[in-house]
Amino acid sequence: MAELLKIQAEMQGRITAMAEVFGARQSELNQAISQRLDGMSQRVSSTITEQTKSTHENLQRLQERLAVIDAAQNNIQTLAKDVVGLQAILSNKQTRGAFGQSRMETIVADGLPMGAYAFQQTLSNGSRPDCTIRMPNGAPPLVIDAKFPLEAWNAIRDAGSPEAAKIAGQQFRRDLEIHIRDISEKYLIQGETQETAFLFVPSESIFAEIHENFEPLVQKAHRARIVIVSPSLLMLSIQVIQAVLKDQRMRAQAHLIQGEVALLMDDLGRLDERVRKLQGHFAMAQKDIDMVVTSADKLTKRGAKIEALEFEAGGEATPARDETPAKSVESRTGLLKLRVVDEE
């Protein structure tokens, strides 16, 4: 029993020592774990803060881009409404004609002065062309038509197959031929209008495709004295007509200019005559001035001679200091004798 008690006491001591060692190790382990957890908490906190900041900035940029996208979407919607409105205008024949006529009227009004053109003027046969331009020298006016058959052209654009495009092209050719014939019959009146009329196409692209793909129609229009013009060609034609009208106005005023030039030449002749008379007066005055200057010089010399005279009390004049021969002159009273010194 004593041995067992002793062994038990030793075991208890060892257990106590091991408990102390485990306790110290546990404390160190807890402290290390605590430090590790604190460091990890700080890193996680800083990482979360940075992520939050970055997320906030990204959200802000995203909101700005969404605002830009919203504005662009509003512009697209507005443009879509305008395109729909333009399509509605071009789909209706009357509004399409008004659209083409409005563009044509703008070009004509910008290029010509008031009174040189007229819109919707009634001709002798009752027809009313879109525009008539008055030509100079009493020539008949030039007729411009702005009604273009756009329905068949839109059908060519909307065709989904080659066969449908071919059918639409044939329809467009027929419509344009009918329109050219109507212009030739209604607006080309002998003695009242020009022998040539303009067919206005309100689009440069349509004008180019007509000349590229429908050349026989262009030739037929030329044979019918109908000229197909685009906005740029119409503007160029208006500029040429403006130059012709300006030249005609200059020629109309030429006789007035010649009359004014004749009057100007008369005034120049009278001015030349008066200048020559004035030049003669100046010459005579210069001659008189020269004579006056000569007389003044003689008077000056005579005065100098008189200043050179010397008088004596006995009635005789003594010669001056110089030895110049003198001529004696007696006074009427006989009291004074003058000695005149002649320097000449």
Image (cartoon, helix red, strand yellow):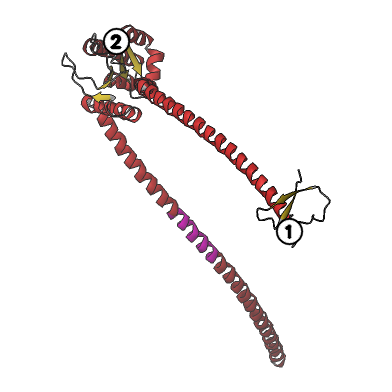
Q: Helix, strand or loop at disc 2?
A: loop
Residue 234 visible within the image: no
Q: Helix, strand or loop at disc 1?
A: loop
Q: Residue at x 81, y 49 (%)?
A: 324
Q: Percent from the top left, x then y, of residue 191?
A: 24, 10
Quadrant where the C terminus sits is top right
Query: Mark 2 to mark 1: distance in Å?
Result: 122 Å
Mark on residue 220? none
Closest to the observer, 283 or 20: 283
Q: Nearer the viewer, mark 2 or mark 1?
A: 1
Does residue 299 sit above or below 119 in this rendering?
below
For mark 2, what is the residue? 195
Quarter location, residue 245: top left
Quadrant where the N terminus sits is bottom right
Q: Residue at x 59, y 36 (%)?
A: 287
For mark 1, what is the residue? 315
Mark 1 or mark 2, which is nearer the start of the sequence?
Answer: 2
Boundaries of the magenta span: 48-63
Closest to the observer, 257 or 155: 257
Closest to the observer, 277 or 75: 277
Q: Mark 2 near mark 1, Cβ–Cβ under 8 Å?
A: no
Does residue 294 sit above or below 138 in this rendering?
below
In the displayed structure, does residue 93 sit left or right of residue 297?
left
Q: Residue at x 29, y 28 (%)?
A: 105
Query: Is residue 59 covered in magenta?
Result: yes
Residue 150 visible within the image: yes
Does residue 251 sit above or below 29 in this rendering?
above
In the displayed structure, does residue 50 sit left or right of residue 135?
right
> Mark 1 is on which residue type?
Gly
> Mark 2 is on which residue type?
Glu
